[in-house]
Image: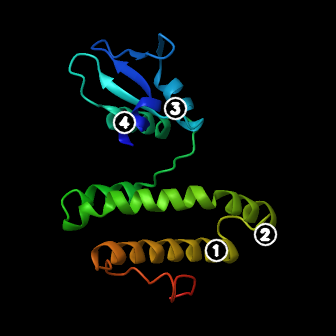
Amino acid sequence: MADSVKAQQTVIKKYANRRLYHTGTSTYVTLEDLSTMVQNGEDFVVYDARTSDDITRSVLTQIIFEQENKAGADNLLPVAFLRQLIRFYGDSMRTMVPSFLEFSMANFAKDQDGLREKFSTGFSGAGFGSSALQTAIEQQVRANMGFFGDAMKMFTGFTPPGVPNANTNAGQPS
């Protein structure tokens, strides 16, 4: 199955001169082009042309870095989040962070249509500081944490500290 997924991915080669070559279209592309591909749901893998190493992670990180530093652009990564992420590099919990972030982002992406609807109807004019909006976000976060805790418990028998059970109190205020 992993081979079939790789076969469907577009291959990008990065050369020593930092140029990116799209092997499917036989054209050079920019980081902005790759960003557009991600936004359109097109998966790709980036290989170093000289070593054949998979450098997809570093290229995606570079795209995020450039997006975060665009003049006038909204930042998706708050400074407090970045600091905490850096702290996890030396922490014993670091092995759980990738799974948790991937799980949380997948759930957020899955629920984004419902959130958009809530923003456009139920919270219109309420603004980000409104208690109704904050309550809805907190409930979603609690539910996601509960689902993640249940998944961890199912696979490892271990529930991370501070993670509620999704079936008992995920949607209830603490």
Q: Residues within 10 Å of mark 2 (few under 14, many from 20)?
A: few
What residue does disc 2 label?
122
The x, y position of residue 112, in whole percent, is 64, 57
User: In the picture shown, does residue 108 fall above or below 64?
Assistant: below
> Residue 52: image x %, image y %?
24, 23
Q: Residues within 10 Å of mark 4 (few under 14, many from 20)?
A: few
| Callout 1 touching callout 2 (CB < 8 Å) | yes
Name the residue located 33 percent from the left edge and 17 percent from the top edge. Answer: 18
Q: Give the SS element for disc 2.
A: helix
Alpha-carbon span between mark 2 and mark 4: 45 Å
Q: Amino acid at mark 2?
A: Gly
Labels 2 and 3: the sequence-earlier one: 3
Indicate whether 46 appears above or below 64: above
Q: CA distance from mark 2 to mark 3?
A: 32 Å
Camera-side residue of 4 and 65: 4
Q: Residue at x 41, y 24 (%)?
A: 11
**Contact? badges 2 and 4 (CB < 8 Å):** no
**Is the Cβ of the residue at disc 2 closer than 8 Å to that at disc 3?**
no
Return the x and y of residue 152 as percentages of the image width and height.
35, 73
Q: Which residue is mark 4?
A: 3
Look at the numbered disc 1 and give the secondary structure of its residue. Answer: helix
Residue occupying image coordinates x 34% and y 38%: 57
- What is the distance, in whole Å, between disc 1 and disc 4 at their CAs? 41 Å
Locate residue 4: give its quadrant: top left
Measured Cα–Cα span from mark 1 to mark 2: 10 Å
Checking the image for residue 136, the label placed there is 1
Q: Is residue 159 left or right of residue 39?
A: left
Label 3: few (<14), some (14–19) or many (≥20) C-alpha neighbours in 10 Å: some
Name the residue located 20 percent from the left edge and 21 percent from the top edge: 51
Residue hosting label 3: 35
Q: Position of residue 2 (x, y in %)?
A: 36, 41
